[in-house]
Image: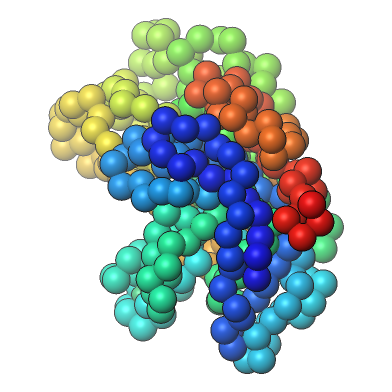
């Protein structure tokens, strides 16, 4: 199937239109017309080869909402016309202990990423959601529950599950004391989801500038991390702190805020951190952890939870040809809180 997308051809080229083929349907494949795709900081990093493993051309996009246009003959879960979503992975081995537990993101053989990866069968490059069409095996398509606003659902597949998974891993519920560091795309979802689960939510920020936003998103308060007295008073007061800051930073100020057995979980920064002190870890039996996205079953649970609670990201809609400007704004953190591309703004080559 011929389709059209937007691709980076090298680390320093802007994204431009790119015509390519999607594979013919395998028996367990679902084909979809892409309706909306979220823009994530990862897209920018991969397009520019910031992590050193980009292979060009790259068609980014791993928060995808579409309408099913065709199904292979073994597909049982979906039919033409269904609304489906695809996140950061499109395949895994399906055999190992982690896959059997529904933790495909932790597959022992590595999951297959939605873009900048290789198909497990043909070794062809995977291309993401900055495109008109997508083909994916049915196990990695999620069902978009009725009632969820399709135009705002795409970021849930990345920022949503990345923050929902640690909340569930550490059993957050009514009475849990949750801190959120960083109030960007990930942080704003962490606040909404933690509040939706009934937790007491504190946003931690260097200044009071974001207080009104934090409260509007559902936080109970904002703690100013540069205020030494306020930080001392907040010591031992948190069960879980979700750190969404996407750049190298110092986590030491946050560790004493954790209660005994409390955990600070990193979901934003990929790479080195400023040196952490073990003193608060040893003395309080506190933990530092990391967490990637979630498994497929947990991602479906998150979508269903968001539909039930009417939790959606705050989005700004753009056209496909505005992508390079959006990347520049993303670099300056100038978006509240996630860009979504309206894929109807991109015409298929057959229509041109
Ligand atoms: Zn992402
Ligand atoms: Zn596996």
Of the pair 276 and 12, the residue shown nearer to us: 12
Give the quarter of the image for residue 32.
bottom right
**Up/down of 42 relative to 229, above or below:** below
**Up/down of 348 relative to 283, above or below:** below
From the top left corner, tell me how far across and down residue 226 is, in percent: 40, 9
Give the quarter of the image for residue 234.
top left
Give the residue displayed 53% in from the left and 50% down from the top: 59
Asked whether residue 274 is in view, the answer is: yes
From the top left corner, tell me how far across and down residue 31 is, in percent: 67, 72
From the top left corner, tell me how far across and down residue 292 is, in percent: 40, 52
Give the residue displayed 41% in from the left and 78% down from the top: 121
Asked whether residue 170 is in view, the answer is: no
Of the pair 294 and 278, the residue shown nearer to us: 294
From the top left corner, tell me how far across and down residue 303 is, in percent: 66, 59
Give the residue displayed 69% in from the left and 35% down from the top: 321
Q: Quadrant of the N terminus?
A: bottom right
Callout count = 0
Colour scheme:
rainbow
Give the quarter of the image for residue 323.
top right
């Amino acid at each position: 199937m011929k389709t059209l997308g937007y691709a980076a051809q090298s680390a320093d080229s802007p994204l431009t239109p790119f015509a390519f083929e999607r594979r013919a349907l395998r028996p367990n494949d679902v084909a979809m017309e892409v309706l909306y795709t979220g823009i994530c900081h990862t897209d920018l990093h991969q397009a520019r080869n910031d992590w050193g493993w980009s292979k060009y051309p790259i068609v980014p996009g791993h928060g995808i909402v579409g309408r099913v246009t065709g199904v292979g003959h073994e597909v049982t879960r979906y039919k033409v016309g269904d609304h489906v979503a695809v996140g950061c992975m499109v395949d895994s081995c399906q055999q190992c202990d982690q896959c059997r537990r529904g933790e495909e993101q932790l597959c022992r053989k590595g999951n297959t990423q939605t873009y900048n990866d290789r198909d497990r069968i043909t070794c062809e490059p995977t291309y993401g959601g900055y495109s008109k069409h997508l083909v994916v095996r049915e196990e990695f398509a999620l069902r978009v529950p009725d009632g969820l606003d399709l135009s705002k659902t795409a970021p849930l597949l990345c920022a949503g599950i990345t923050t929902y998974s640690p909340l569930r891993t550490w059993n957050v519920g009514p009475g849990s004391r949750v801190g959120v560091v960083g109030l960007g795309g990930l942080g704003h979802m962490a606040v909404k989801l933690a509040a939706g689960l009934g937790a007491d939510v504190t946003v931690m920020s260097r200044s009071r500038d974001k207080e009104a936003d934090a409260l509007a998103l559902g936080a109970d308060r904002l703690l100013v991390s540069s205020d030494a007295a306020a930080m001392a008073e907040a010591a031992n007061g948190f069960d879980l702190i979700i750190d969404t800051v996407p750049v190298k930073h110092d986590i030491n100020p946050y560790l004493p805020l954790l209660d005994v057995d409390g955990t600070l979980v990193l979901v934003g920064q990929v790479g080195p951190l400023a040196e952490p002190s073990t003193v608060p870890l040893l003395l309080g039996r506190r933990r530092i952890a990391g967490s990637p996205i979630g498994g497929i079953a947990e991602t479906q649970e998150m979508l269903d939870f968001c539909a039930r609670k009417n939790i959606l990201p705050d989005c700004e809609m753009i056209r496909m040809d505005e992508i390079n400007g959006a990347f520049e704004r993303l670099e300056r953190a100038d978006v509240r809180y996630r860009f979504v591309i309206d894929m109807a703004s991109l015409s298929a080559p057959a229509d041109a």
